[in-house]
Amino acid sequence: MNPTPEKINDSLSDSNSENARQQQKLHKKKSSTQLPQPGTTQGSCAFDSAMITLVPITDAAHVVHGPSGCAASIWGTYSSLSSGSMLYKIRFTSDIDENDIIFGGAKKLYKGILELQRRYKPAAVFVYSTCITALIGDDIEGVCKDATEKTGIPTIPVHCPGFIGSQNLGNRVAGEALLEHVIGTTEPDTSTPYDINLIGEYNITGAIWNVLPLLEKLGIRVLAKITGDAVYKEVCYAHRAKLNVLLSSKALINMAKSMEKKYGIPYIEESIYGIEQINQCLRNIAAKLGNPDLQERTEKLIVEETAEIDEKLALYITRLQGKRVILYTGSFKSWLIIFAAKKLEMEVIAISTKNNTEEDKIRIKSLLGQDGIILEQNTPQEILQIINENQADMLIADKCYQDTSLTARIPFLDINTERNHPYAGYIGILEVARELYAAFYNPVWEQVYQPAPWSEDGGDGGAGGDEGAGGDRGNGGVTVISSSSPSSPSSPLSSQQEDI
């Protein structure tokens, strides 16, 4: 699948929604709906996100046809976990140099693939083009075809040079590669009326493992995971599922639409982040599969799981309700915090929409309400102003914004792609509550709020006095909310921390 302008434009048309189409017309000059212009940047490139999508296929080898720096750029960045093979953890590269740029690197790539297959015996090999090899015109399609014929091991080209577009486009290019070269090439040993595919979840820190036990309790079989903790063979027979469940992200929605058109598999768009969302996900799966007994068992499971998690969250709600947070992060993490905040009775007053589609932005705005603030490309100074004007209690962002929260003297929570805790399912929302509580009531903030010892007037910039009464934090009028002051080690919740 060569990334021609026509196919790129098709990939960018990611929704049938009339609202989304209208928004795309209104924002057609924005980078999210147009090809990038030379000299501009859009965050993660198409190559990065294509690898993020396909690397979780754990028993396949992943070869970067380009400079070694491209292979190293995302190595270890995303902690997608495996319950089986660890081959996907190894990064292979053809290590293109100056001579290869002049004379071509196709032969070098071919020899490298043969050696890789001889030594590691992978179930399949994915070969990724990069900016340099796409520009010099290396025929990776022909190389992959020759390697497949020579060894009998499927070798799949992924045409994803970074310059073709943004992160979302790279996800879809990877999906197109699976549709063209992988899905439909093998038949499953057995089939059941309750076979489903989970699409768009990459098992970061084992998130999908929080959901699979719920489906097993209901007797629903996950035929293929695309692609979190997947093996190559299961992706091959994904076309025999009875339902596609598109999880959280719109990144692979074109794959779901194509499978519906080609194989007649209906799809639903669901989220596994948030209690109400996982409840709705289970209900919709049972409804689509169309078995009354399954629907009855699903409702019973939801009642049991919801009652158990509500009991565990009760103490966190009493300490976190009413707190106002600013969320400056992207992708699924935006939804995660919005859903968690609603459950914990917190308020999200501002949120970024980077890496979100136009339809996502519409939905986010509806969840925040009329007073919600949408952040596009704000500087730390602008975020500080929003903190000041809205008396925010916490900043949730990537670690590069930690200094911003320290300047504002409000607690900071870093939820990033290298996180160590899965946030999906019922267990995940409890983990979010724990992290929010731990960040907000960290004893360090009691020291941060104290006036500087060298200040004669009780604080630098007026931060002195009784901070419990809502004194100035020393940043343009940002105030300390008395009920939000960090607890001492003897706080009511700390003695019960081990039981929560």
Image (cartoon, grey):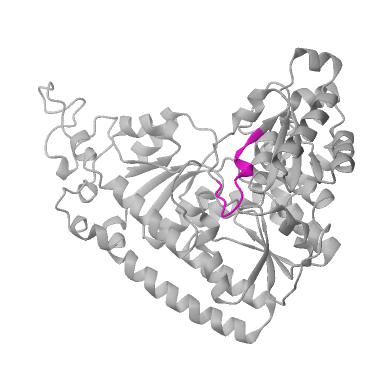
> In x, y percent, where is residue 372?
47, 49
Residue 312 located left or right of residue 213: left
Residue visible at 54% across and 52% down in the picture? 364
Which contiguous range is marked in magenta? Answer: 80-91
Classify 275 as above or below 292: above
Q: Residue at 75% of width from left, 72% of height from top?
A: 190
> Can residue 27 be seen from the camera position used here?
no
Q: Is residue 295 above or below residue 97?
A: below
State the residue in front, 336 or 149: 149
**167 relative position to 1: left or right:** left
Q: Magenta stretch: residue 193 in it?
A: no
Q: What residue occupies the far front of the structure in this picture?
A: 119
Q: Position of residue 307 (x, y in %)?
A: 39, 75
Identify the image quadrant of residue 74: top right
Question: Considering the image in quadrants, where does the C terminus appear?
Answer: bottom left
Write the residue at 55% across / 82% down. 297
| Most common SS among magenta residues | loop
Residue 376 visible in the picture: yes
Residue 379: percent from left, percent from top: 47, 29
